[in-house]
Image (cartoon, grey):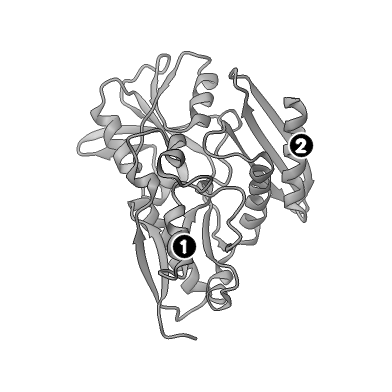
Amino acid sequence: MSTAPLRIGSRSSELALRQTELAIAAITAATPGTETQIIPIHTAGDMRTDIPLCKVNKATQTQDKGVFIAALEEALADGRIDCAVHSLKDMPGTLDERFEIAAILPRETIWDALVIKEGANMERLTIGTSSVRRANLIRNYWSGTAKSISIRGNVATRLQKLIDTPELDAIVLARAGLNRLGYTSDTIEINGTRLHVVEMAKDSFMPAFCQGAIAIEIRKGDTATKALVSPANDPTSELTVRAERAFLAELQADCSVPVGGYATCNRDLMMFRAIYYTPNGMPIRITHRGSSSAPEQVGHEACAMLKQQLG
């Protein structure tokens, strides 16, 4: 084994670093004695919080790259890091051919949660989100009585914006991120202000594909790094995200496409659910079942069902 530490690239936000710590714990548990070094990387998605997330690619010439991964992949390509830790929901469905995903950590809860101010009127909410998926879901979930406004930033920034912005009643965040940052209860206290965390009806508020999953990406053909990282892989989490990424790749969907869903495994059976919003705001729901031994096929077939309904 090499005596040089495994150089792990990570975004510099609190949540990203926490996820990298989880990745390190999984790697060192699976491959004892592995030394690691975290290399913080600043990404376009972190730096350009002045515009909606779906417009960052164009503004920064990252093209079809995920706005939170392009800089990490550049560091991988030029050898500054040996692997990169990502929230898998930030990665495009089709990976750059120079790289591969070496491990998927055990998946956290996949669902979104509403973080709301005390005393907010649940019948007339103004909710902050930068996600086109969440914006469409908000309109449908509250039958048009709630509205969304754009809000960007990491978890701590968005929580503070919620507190500081009078017209905001609530924000939507991934429950996984809250849990990883230690906000596991149904209340959050920040500088004397109490916020409440409300769980929403799950299939009525579909998550982003691959939400709750942490991926470790390496250079393709780097067998030494793969030998260190791949033992941390969780097989069940890998199967579900393979189906979800196959669906995204077939749909050619990026963060500007209002689509969400998830796959689950029950022994040999895989169930795939998705929701897609048409340009006029109408939802199309898909439920498909297939074999968990062929996750990509399940994802492709579910996408074919959606395309058939889209005409």
Could you tell me which residue is drawn at 42 percent across and 85 percent down? 3
| Closer to the camera in the image, 304 or 127 | 304
Could you tell me which residue is drawn at 58 percent across and 42 percent down? 209
Mark 1 lies on residue: 84
**How far across and how far down the image is residue 203, in percent?**
61, 32
| CA separation in Å, label 1 and label 2 | 32 Å
On screen, residue 207 versus residue 43, left or right, reads right
Q: Residues within 10 Å of mark 1 (few under 14, many from 20)?
A: many
Three-letter amino acid code at disc 2? Ala
Q: Quadrant of the C terminus?
A: top right
Could you tell me which residue is drawn at 77 percent across and 49 percent down? 297
Three-letter amino acid code at disc 1? Ala
**How far across and how far down the image is residue 93, in percent?**
61, 48
Q: Is residue 228 above or below residue 128?
A: below
Q: Secondary structure at mark 2?
A: helix
**How far across and how far down the image is residue 105, in percent?**
54, 60
Rendering quarter of residue 33: bottom left
On screen, residue 157 versus residue 296, left or right, reads left
| Closer to the camera in the image, 135 or 310 | 310
On screen, residue 264 versus residue 119, left or right, reads right
| Closer to the camera in the image, 55 or 257 | 55
Q: Is residue 183 visible?
A: no
Q: Residues within 10 Å of mark 2 (few under 14, many from 20)?
A: some
Label 1 with label 2: CB-CB less than 8 Å: no
Q: Secondary structure at mark 1?
A: strand
Mark 2 lies on residue: 304
**How far across and how far down the image is residue 52, in percent?**
40, 33
Q: Is residue 215 above or below residue 208?
A: below
| Closer to the camera in the image, 151 or 64 | 64
Q: Earlier in the sequence, mark 1 or mark 2?
A: 1
